[in-house]
């Protein structure tokens, strides 16, 4: 008999006595099922594997006493339930009367029976049926394992993808926060720039006005002997000085004022301001002994501006406290990291001066607007709102920054950071110790300004000083005068003029006559425009007679 079997299909025949085993083996071999007769359990185990094409045929002679331990061992192995068992039993035999069959049927789920004598076709059919069941079971198990592996892979990928998404979300959140920070800084910078342009423009016109007022007052004070009139002129002069201080604050805030930074010892500055601070505070608050760090680095700052900064901060601290409050001033060397918020100083070595109080503190809303120009929490008429704006402007323009530590009801500490200077401080007054040379009587000076009143005051002061003063109202008129008069030895220019501004005119004059002394009289100018101009060649409006005389004398000497 031949069949369509596969040599990969095997039948393990456990028949120690050999009864009917040779017949069964021959029938299966003819049908294409490879028979393997096993004489004992060890022989059976040697040929057993987990493949799908394996069936186990057991002769029920295992009921005999000598093989009962073997049958028990087979029945006790739970893993054997994966294999199909075909039990050859005597015709008319009963499973109920066969302990071996009962044990296998109860423990192993895949057991069938074949009575002897059996027909060859019946044997082959029974084995093949068992093998097909075993194959389907094996395939199902393999499919289940594949599904489990796929589920594990999917779960692992889900975990990995979730981690990737969480990381991406964190990066996105950080980018959004950074973008919001940058946009906030940009909006603040744009607001400050817009208001800065407004304040600098107002300061320019106001400085021209103050130049006329102070110039005429100085001229009148020289010619009047009446005490009452002189007293009124002194009051007018004081009012003009206050106006000049206000415009200086506006220009410092808007960064349109050219600073004259130099190495400064802030410890010396704070000590020298002791009397001024006590008189300004008026006894309403207690000023503690300054906490000044030993070995303080020199700071790069305009000496006059840092005094205004400290004074402004002290006045703000006084106004934030009740009578009897405490004011503290401290200095320190600080190494700053990268800035995190607008207004903070850049990374590097800085010298810090701080002014702190134990007053009312700031709310978050007030803190967010602290540096805005004209913003103030003081009553009407008690503050311009430019104090902290000036502090911010001076610090930023000097290459530093400002931070505020505050808590509502617990006080405020404002820290001003200035870049560390790389040279020793210069004692004030050393550079100006040598008095200016007296002017010659025949020195001709050209004054160029688009404001008629400013020109008239300036030329009047120059005439009083002994100079011969010429004037022009524009750059074009100045060039015409310059070509007509070869004896002009110096020029005083207003920078902000319509048409040809002072910078353009200065370059043209220098081209026509190299080495010509040129001084800029200005109340408003972009800092970059005069960055290369020495401070001795800049006269700040409203200027004093002494300042004009000193700088002009040095220029023409």
Image: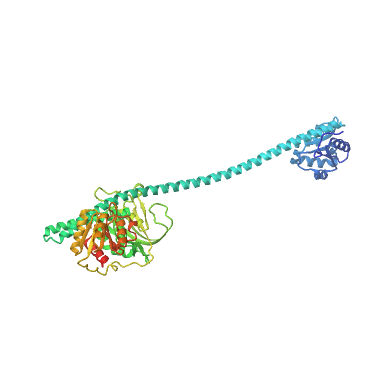
Name the spot of residue 45 as percent of width and height, x first: 80, 44
Residue furthest bottom as drawn: 434
Residue at 37% from the left image edge and 53% from the top image edge: 343
Name the spot of residue 546 as percent of width and height, x first: 22, 63
Which quadrant of the rendered structure holds the N terminus? top right
Q: Nearer the viewer, residue 9 or 340?
A: 340
Name the spot of residue 140 as percent of width and height, x first: 71, 36
Query: In this rendering, is residue 343 above or below 299?
Result: above
Say if residue 276 shows up in the picture.
Answer: yes
- What colour scheme does the image use? rainbow
Residue furthest top as drawn: 92
Say if residue 325 shows up in the picture.
Answer: no
Classify residue 422 as left or right of residue 227.
Answer: right
Q: Nearer the viewer, residue 471 or 200?
A: 471
Count of residue discs: 0
Which quadrant of the rendered structure holds the C terminus? bottom left
Q: Nearer the viewer, residue 57 or 506?
A: 506
Classify residue 541 as left or right of residue 229.
Answer: right
Query: In this rendering, is residue 230 above or below 2?
Result: below
Residue furthest left as drawn: 226
Name the spot of residue 390 as percent of width and height, x first: 31, 54
Classify residue 50 as left or right of residue 438.
Answer: right
């Amino acid at each position: 008999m031949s069949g369509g079997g596969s040599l990969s299909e095997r039948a393990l025949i456990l028949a120690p006595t050999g009864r009917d085993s040779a017949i069964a083996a021959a029938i299966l071999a003819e049908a294409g099922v490879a028979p393997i007769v096993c004489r004992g359990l060890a022989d059976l185990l040697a040929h057993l594997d987990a493949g799908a094409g394996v069936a186990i045929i057991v002769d029920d002679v295992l009921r005999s006493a000598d093989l009962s331990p073997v049958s028990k061992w087979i029945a006790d192995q739970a893993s054997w339930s994966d294999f199909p068992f075909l039990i050859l039993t005597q015709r008319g035999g009963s499973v109920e009367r066969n302990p071996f069959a009962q044990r296998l049927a109860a423990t192993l789920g895949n057991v069938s029976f074949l009575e002897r004598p059996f027909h060859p076709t019946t044997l082959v059919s029974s084995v093949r049926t068992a093998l097909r069941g075993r194959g389907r079971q094996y395939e199902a198990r393999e499919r289940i394992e594949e599904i489990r592996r796929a589920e594990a892979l999917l779960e692992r990928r889900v975990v990995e993808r979730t981690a990737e998404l969480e990381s991406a979300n964190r990066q996105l959140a950080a980018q959004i926060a950074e973008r919001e920070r940058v946009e906030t800084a940009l909006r603040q910078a744009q607001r400050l720039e817009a208001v800065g342009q407004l304040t600098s423009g107002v300061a320019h016109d106001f400085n021209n006005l103050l130049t006329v007022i102070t110039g005429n007052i100085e001229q009148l004070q020289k010619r009047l002997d009446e005490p009452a009139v002189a007293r009124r002129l002194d009051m007018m002069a004081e009012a003009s000085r206050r106006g000049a201080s206000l415009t200086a604050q506006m220009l410092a805030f808007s960064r349109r004022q050219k600073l004259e930074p130099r190495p400064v010892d802030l410890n010396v500055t704070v000590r020298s301001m002791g009397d001024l601070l006590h008189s300004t505070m008026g006894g309403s608050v207690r000023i503690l002994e300054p906490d000044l760090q030993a070995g303080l680095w020199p700071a790069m700052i305009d000496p006059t501006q840092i005094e205004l900064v400290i004074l402004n901060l002290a006045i703000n601290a006084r106004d934030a406290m009740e009578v009897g409050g405490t004011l503290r001033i401290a200095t320190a060397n600080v190494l700053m990291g990268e800035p995190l918020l607008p207004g903070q100083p850049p990374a590097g070595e800085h010298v810090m001066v701080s002014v702190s109080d134990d007053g009312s503190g700031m709310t978050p809303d007030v803190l967010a607007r602290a540096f805005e120009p004209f913003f103030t929490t003081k009553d009407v008429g008690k503050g311009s709102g430019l104090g902290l704006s000036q502090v911010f402007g001076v610090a930023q323009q000097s290459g530093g920054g400002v931070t505020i530590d505050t808590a509502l009801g617990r006080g405020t500490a404002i820290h001003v950071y200035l870049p560390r200077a790389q040279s020793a401080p210069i004692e004030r007054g050393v550079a100006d110790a040598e008095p200016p040379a007296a002017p010659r009587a025949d020195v001709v000076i050209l004054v160029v300004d688009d404001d008629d009143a400013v020109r008239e005051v300036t030329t009047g002061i120059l005439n009083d000083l002994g100079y011969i003063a010429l004037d022009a109202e524009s750059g074009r008129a100045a060039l015409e005068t310059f070509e007509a008069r070869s004896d002009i030895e110096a020029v005083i220019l207003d920078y902000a003029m319509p048409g040809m501004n002072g910078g353009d005119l200065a370059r043209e004059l220098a081209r026509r006559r190299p080495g010509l002394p040129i001084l800029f009289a200005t109340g408003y100018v972009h800092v970059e425009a005069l960055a290369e101009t020495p401070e001795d060649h800049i006269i700040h409006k409203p200027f004093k007679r002494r300042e004009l005389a000193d700088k002009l004398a040095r220029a023409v000497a």
